[in-house]
Image (cartoon, grey):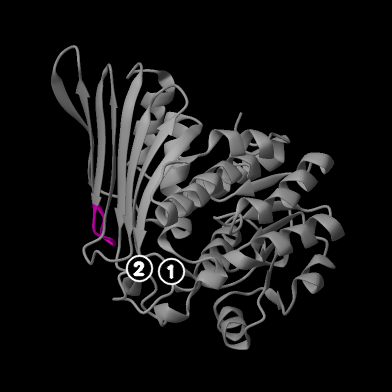
């Protein structure tokens, strides 16, 4: 296995380090056009680093990991598909909008190529038990899901000026709705395809960005389940969590803080009317979720299995982002189901 990591910013460096834990350094390379970042990576890791993607692809990698800013994901993924036989791993979000991603989706469908869109939150210790119980059917019919994520943007990457990162710039695919696409991903996994969405999003002006910094979303899903999501760049004491309410009881996950992150996961049984603690304590090293995702990815590649996080599902999440933005502008509910059918994603 030869792995090429394209983009060596914060997430790219994480993936580079994690791949070096399982592969020989001669089987791992990077791509980074920024000389300062490239020099720092060469000092930290014993790998070859190319200046442009085309140079790295001449090395004939088996896997290319796209870890660049959001606005580059689709064009670089298409370059990989057009000029190499490598499998793709694409950091979330897969692109800035569905129209941009659709040619990539079609190319993957036509060629049968392997593509995995990163969703590391699926491997979080607060999410894993919730997903397992919902997928097993323990709660029966799901009535509604409520989730939230709030974390002060200047704290995300303290070694950088947050105003210069992609998160703070609309042209680079920033804004909390795209940046926190994790919550849309989980809503789709737990509640199924969306029918319509309403959203109120706002730029408060307090962070000197040109993107939405806070948003509240309500979504109706196929089958009648409703999801409610809040997300923002504003809260200085980081908080994240989810409630899943069904006929069989309630599942809750709540996390506070970061490094350390306190986590509490509970289950209320509607029959016994008792609450049990499924997990209480501090989250593992946050890198463990990334390592679990890496291992799942590598197992699929080794076994020739289908991706567990494909571009089609990622487009469904983008449809929710697009619908949320349109709803915020119009002040109306926005239908998602018809658009999805027309674009060949959600049925």
The stretch drawn in magenta includes residue 6? no
**Which residue lies under the disc numbered 1?**
211
Work out whether residue 274 or residue 4 is closer to the camera in this orientation and state it. Answer: 274
Q: Is residue 225 left or right of residue 106?
A: left
Look at the magenta stretch and give its main secondary structure: loop
At x 43%, y 74%, the residue is 210
Number of marks in picture: 2
**SS at badge 1:** loop
Is residue 123 at least partly visible in the picture?
no
Give, as a single range, the part of the protein colored magenta. Answer: 256-262
Placement of the C terminus among the 4 image quadrants: top right
Residue 239 % position (x, y): 25, 55
Work out whether residue 10 or residue 301 is closer to the camera in this orientation and state it. Answer: 10
Residue 203, disc: 2
Residue 333 % position (x, y): 42, 42
The stretch drawn in magenta includes residue 261? yes
Is residue 54 at least partly visible in the picture?
yes
């Amino acid at each position: 296995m030869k792995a090429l990591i394209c983009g060596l910013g914060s997430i790219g460096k994480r993936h580079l380090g994690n791949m070096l834990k399982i592969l020989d350094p001669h089987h791992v390379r990077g791509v980074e056009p920024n000389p300062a970042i490239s020099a720092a990576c060469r000092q930290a890791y014993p790998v070859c680093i190319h200046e442009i993607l085309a140079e790295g692809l001449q090395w004939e990698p088996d896997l290319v990991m796209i870890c660049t800013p959001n606005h580059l994901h689709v064009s670089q993924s298409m370059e990989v598909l057009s000029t190499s036989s490598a499998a793709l791993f694409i950091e979330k979000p897969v692109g800035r909008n569905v129209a941009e991603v659709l040619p990539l989706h079609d190319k993957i469908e036509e060629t049968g190529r392997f593509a995995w869109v990163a969703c590391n939150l699926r491997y979080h210790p607060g999410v894993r038990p919730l997903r397992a119980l919902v997928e097993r059917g323990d709660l029966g019919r799901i009535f509604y899901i409520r989730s939230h994520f709030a974390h002060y943007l200047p704290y995300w990457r303290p070694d950088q000026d947050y105003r210069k990162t992609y998160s703070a710039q609309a042209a680079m695919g920033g804004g909390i709705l795209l940046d926190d696409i994790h919550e849309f991903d989980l809503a789709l996994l737990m509640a199924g395809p969306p029918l319509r969405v309403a959203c109120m999003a706002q730029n408060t002006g307090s962070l000197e960005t040109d993107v939405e910094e806070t948003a509240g979303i309500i979504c109706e899903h196929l089958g009648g389940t409703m999801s409610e999501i809040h997300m923002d760049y504003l809260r200085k004491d980081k908080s994240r969590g989810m409630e899943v309410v069904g006929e069989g009881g309630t599942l809750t996950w709540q996390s506070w803080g970061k490094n350390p992150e306190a986590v509490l996961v509970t289950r209320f049984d509607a029959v016994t009317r008792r609450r049990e603690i499924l997990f209480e304590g501090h989250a593992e090293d946050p890198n463990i979720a990334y390592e679990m995702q890496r291992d799942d990815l590598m197992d699929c590649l080794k076994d020739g299995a289908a991706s567990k996080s494909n571009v089609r599902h990622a487009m469904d999440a983008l449809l929710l982002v697009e619908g949320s933005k349109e709803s915020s502008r119009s002040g109306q509910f926005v239908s998602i189901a018809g658009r999805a059918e027309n674009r060949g994603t959600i049925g």
